Amino acid sequence: MDDIQIVNEKYIVQLRERVERKLGETGGICEPLEKALRGKRMPIENPRVVYQGEPGAYSEMAAIDFFGKDVNSEGLLHFEDTFKRLMDNTADYAVLPIENSSTGAIRQVYDLLAKYECYIVGETTVRVRHNLMVLPDADISDIKAVFSHEQGLFQCEEYLSEHSEWEKIPQADTAGSARMVAELKDKTKAAICSSRAAEIYGLKIIQKEINTNTNNTTRFVVISKKLELREGRDKICISFKTRHKAGALHEALTVFRIYGLNLVRLESRPIPEHNWEYMFFTEFTGDLLMEGMNTVVQALMCTVSDIRIFGNFKANLF
């Protein structure tokens, strides 16, 4: 057994002892878990769903995928607008992108999750197939400017590099870019977005699937004002802050090893009011109601601070 392994084994023994003492001192369910479960509700039937973007956006497609083709959904201008609608009870759920297989985390959504008291109650994925589209009477030789969300432009960077003469203009969302091209009625303008957007806004696709990664996929989360424990839930999302000392994150991650939990995602975000300190969003397999989860959270409380439970939902990835 090498020195590092000996240190790790000693730490595990010490951590178990600390957890046992804490359980003996507090008893009952720990505060972060109790707070999340206290306000839980059943899923809402015929819900009002909001997303960021225009009809035809990938976010709308995600809403349809999760709630069905007859979903009562509405597109809003900004990510934060969807959270505000949840908080003032004029929407039941928001569907928002949280990560892309090519470009990584959607940092704005993580920051808004940290800001608002909301929960993740589900997830779904949408295969991103970006298409280049123009007015019905335009052609590729007419194009001088291309509109899309900044992520859409980045995900098609290889194709766009072949047309360096085109001006690339970021917009709030992909489908909104299609609507803009349709409204401008300018043959020199093009949009990059979904085939559904082309159909909605009457545009012509002149080049299909121009994204560099043909397996490009965006993961969306379904957000609610209240915790929901839907059938089939098998993934938990929490956040925590580590103490500002060497090995702090390693100590926290050791908890998942000790209790045999599969850590499937770890995302860090800076804490604005504390320079060079970070909040970690963590996803791992499990059920909040399963035996021993209270002990797991207590163990984390021995190693980190400001634990917050963001949800327990069914993994739905492809």
Image (cartoon, grey):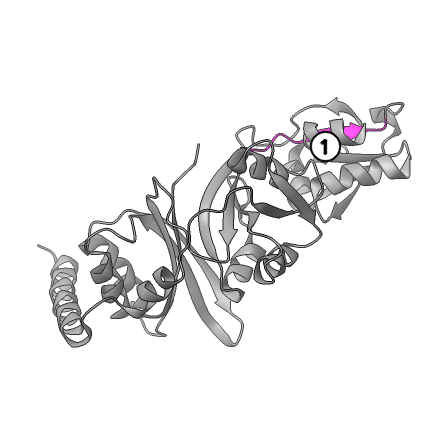
Q: Which residues are magenta?
A: 126-135
Instruction: Please name the residue shown 32% across and 63% down the image.
Output: 33
Please provide percent x and percent y for residue 189. 85, 36
Residue 55 vertical placement versus 118 (above, below): above
Judge left or right: residue 109 versus residue 236: right
Residue 158 vertical placement versus 302 (above, below): above
Instruction: Please name the residue shown 12% across and 69% down the image.
Output: 17
Location of residue 210 (image quadrant): top right
Which residue is nearer to you in this view: 55 or 176? 55
Residue 316 vertical placement versus 111 (above, below): above
Residue 72 showing in the rendered view: yes
Location of residue 244 (image quadrant): bottom left
Please provide percent x and percent y for residue 180. 82, 41
Q: Amino acid at mark 1?
A: Ala
Judge left or right: residue 91 versus residue 163: left
> In which quadrant of the rendered image does the N terminus lie?
bottom left
**What number of labels is visible?**
1
Please provide percent x and percent y for residue 294. 23, 61
Question: Within the magenta stretch, is there residue 129?
Answer: yes
Question: Within the magenta stretch, is there residue 56?
Answer: no
Residue furthest to the front in view is: 45
Residue furthest to the left in view is: 1
Instruction: Please name the residue shown 20% across and 68% down the image.
Output: 28
> In which quadrant of the rendered image does the C terminus lie?
top left
Crowd rating for badge 1 (residues with CA inside 10 Å; few <14, some 14–19, many 20+): many
Q: Secondary structure at mark 1?
A: helix
| Main SS, magenta residues | strand
Please provide percent x and percent y for residue 249. 32, 64
Q: Label 1 belongs to which residue?
A: 197
Residue 144 showing in the rendered view: no
